[in-house]
Amino acid sequence: MSLAERLSEDAHDIQALQKKNDLANAGGGQINLQLVPYDLLTEKEKKKNRERCQDLLKYIQFQGYHLFKAGKEGEHERADKNPENRFANTLLEKLISYLDASVPCMKLLRPSNNFTRRNSFKKSNKGVKFFNKVVLPVIEKYFSHQRAYFTAMATAAAQAGVSTIQEKEAVASLFCKLANLLRLRLSTFGCDAKQAVKCLEVLVKALDARSLAKSRPEFVRTSLLTFFNSCADDLEKTIVNLHEGKYPHLRGTHMKTCTSFNYIFETLVPVLTSTFDHLAMYEYGPDLLVDEIQVASYKILESLYIIGTNLSLTKARKFLRTEIAHYRDTIGTCLSAFSSTFPVAFLEPSLSKHNPNSVHGSGFAKRSLEAQEVTARIEQSIPSLDSLIAEVDKFVEEGTTYTEKPQIIDVVLPFLCSYLPYWWHQGPDNVDPKGGSHVTMVTADHMNQLFKIILKLIMKNVGEASSEWMSKIAMYSQQIIINTSEELLKDPLLPLTEKVRKKVEAMYAKEVSLSGYMKAAVDEASQIEGEILEEWSLIVRDIYAFYPLMIKYVDQQKNLWIRNNVEEAEYLYNHVGEIFNVMNVSAYFKKEEHTFISSNEIDVKALLMPSTGRGRAQPAAEPAAGAGGGGGGGGSKKKKVKKEKAKKSGKGDGSSSIIVAALKRLLPVGLNLFAGREQEMVQHCKDR
C-alpha cells in the first residue's frame, strides 16, 4: 500500500471518530453516511482523500524534507550509504525498464504500408510516444552533463562522487540495448531517429571500458562484443550488396534497413566515431579492443576503408556515387578516430607479433581460425604505411585533382595524420624495448615527410575555387607537427607564404583600382563588390588552410631561429607582416575573415592551443558530479555572458583572427631585425 493511500485511510478514520464523538456529546442526531469503514467508500470518495494526501506529500518534499520509515537506530544511515538507493542507479533502472517496455510496441511495418490509401499515417501508442519524446531527451541531457560521474575511477582515498560498477554496467547495457533497437527497427523511430543517434553518442562517452573489462569481463564478451560484431556484419553486408547490386537494401526500401546508406552513414558511422574518440580520449583501447572485439574491429576497419577508397563499388550508379561522395569525409573521420585508439600498428602487420595487445602477440590467433583469416585479409586490403605515404606523394607530385581521387584527401590523409602521432610515442624515437622488438617503426621522419607533402598540396591548390577541402585540412593535419625538422622552413613553408602574400597584394591592388570605378558605375557596384568578396574568401580559405600549421611549426622552431639568426625566418616574418598590413587597410579582407569563421564554425583558439600530439582529442576538465545529481553549468553561462559583452564592445576581434595570432607568434623573430633602441620601442608598443 502506498503512503498516500495509508494517509487517506487514516484521515478517514480520524474524521469518522471525530463525528462519532460529536454525536455522542450532542446526545444523538442524524447519522452521517460516511461513518463506514474505508474499504466500503466509493472510488470517488476515496479519490478525494487520496488527492489531498498526495498534495500534502508533494508539499513536504518541495520544502526539502525527506520521509522515511522509522526503524532501529542506524538503519536510515545504512540505507543512505547503500549504492542501490542512489539517484543514478534508480534512474538507470527506470530508463532500461522504459526501453524494454517500448520494444514490443514498436512494430516493424512493410515500407509499402506507409504509402497505401487506407494507412496514410501510423499511430503509436502512449508508451512509444513517451519513450521517443521524454525518455530519449532525458538520456541525452543527463548523460551529457554527468558523464564525468560515470567515467571517474574510485580510489582508496576518494570514493565519493564516483559511480559503482553496477551503474557502469547499467550504462553499457542501456547503450547496447538502444543501439540494437535502432539497428533492427530504425524505421519505427521516424523523425526521432536523429535524437536516438545523439543519445547513443552521449551514452558511449559515459562508458568506463577499463572498469568493465576488469570487473565485468563476461558482460564485455556478451553485450559489447555483440555490438561490435553487429557493426562489422552490417558493414560487410553493405559491401556485398554493393557488389551484387541489391539496391533496395541500400536505399532502405527493404524490410532489413541495417545495410541501408541511411543507417550506415547517419547512425552507424557517427556512433562508431564517438566510440573510438571516447576510447582514445581515456586510452581504453588496450583494455577493450582485444581478442574477439579486436577481430570485429579489424572487420570494421577493412569495410570502412573499402567503402571509402574503392570508387568502382558504385558501378557508375549516380545514386551510389552521390551518397558515398557526400559521406566520404565522415568515413575518413571515423577511420581517424579508429587509428588513434586501436592498440595494434595495423599498417605495419609484420610487427604485430611483438605486440602483446594484438591477437598474434597474445596467442589468441592460434586458438581462432577467424582471427588468422581476418588479419591475413587486412594485409591484402589495406596498403602498408610506406605505400600509403608514397601514394599521397604521387597524388601531389602528379597534380592529380580532387575529383579524380577524392579518397586521398577525405580518407587517407586523416587516416595517416592520426596514425603517425599515436604510434610515434611508442616507436624507436621514444621507446627502447628491453629484450624485445619494436611494436612499430614510426619515426619523426615519417611525420616530417607527410607534413612536407601536405604543405606542397596546399601550395598547389592556392586560389583554386574547386578545392573546398582546404577549409578542413588544418583541423586534422596539426597532429603530425610534433618533432619537426628545420629544413621545412626553406622548402616548402617559405615559398607557400610568399605565394599567399603575392596573392593578397595583387587582390588588394585590384580592390583599390576598382573602388573608384564602383563609385562611378553605381549600377554595377553590387556585382563588382560580390566578385571582390568571392576572391577574398578564397584567399582567407587558403590562409586558414596553412596558418594553423605554420603557427604550430613556428612555436617549435622560433627559439632555434633566434639563436642562430636564421635569415629565412626573417623573410617569413616579413611575409606575414605584409599580409597583416593589408588586412588592416582592406575594407573586405577582415570582413571576409569573420564571415569565414562564422560560416565554418571555426574555433580559432582551439586551432592555436598547443596539443600533446597524442590522439585526436584530449579530455576536457569537467567538474566532478556527486552521485549522479544535477550538474551546475553556472560557469558556462558566465563565460557566454562575457563573450557577448566582448562582442558588443568590439573586443575580441583581434583574438579571433588567426592572422593577428600568427604575427604575435613571429614577433620575437621580428625583433631581431631592430637595433637595441628600436627593440625597446617595439617592446613598449607590444606591452601597450
Image (cartoon, rainbow, N blue to C red):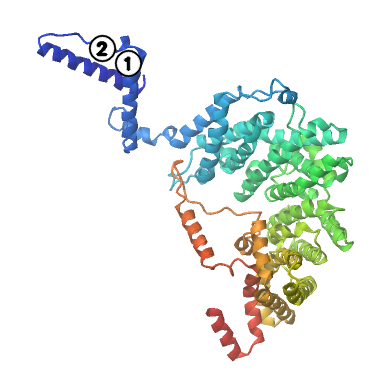
**In this image, 620 relative to 509: left or right?**
left
Q: Amino acid at mark 1?
A: Glu
Q: Which residue is mark 2?
A: 34
Residue 208: numbered disc: none
Q: Position of residue 622 (x, y in %)?
A: 51, 51
| Helix, strand or loop at mark 1 | helix
Q: In the rendered view, would you say 171 is above or below 19?
A: below
Dot placed on the residue nearer the N-terminal end, 1 or 2: 2
Q: Position of residue 619 (x, y in %)?
A: 57, 52
Q: Nearer the viewer, residue 621 or 190?
A: 190
Q: In the rendered view, would you say 174 is above or below 161?
A: above
Residue at point 32%, 31% (across, down) = 67
Query: How many residues crowd mark 2 within 10 Å: few (<14), some (14–19), many (20+)?
Result: some
Q: Amino acid at mark 2?
A: Gln
Residue at point 50%, 57% (across, down) = 640
Q: Nearer the viewer, residue 686 or 279?
A: 686
Res 447 quadrant in image: bottom right
Residue 45: numbered disc: 1
**In this image, 323 relative to 611: left or right?**
right
Q: In the rendered view, would you say 493 is above or below 372?
A: below
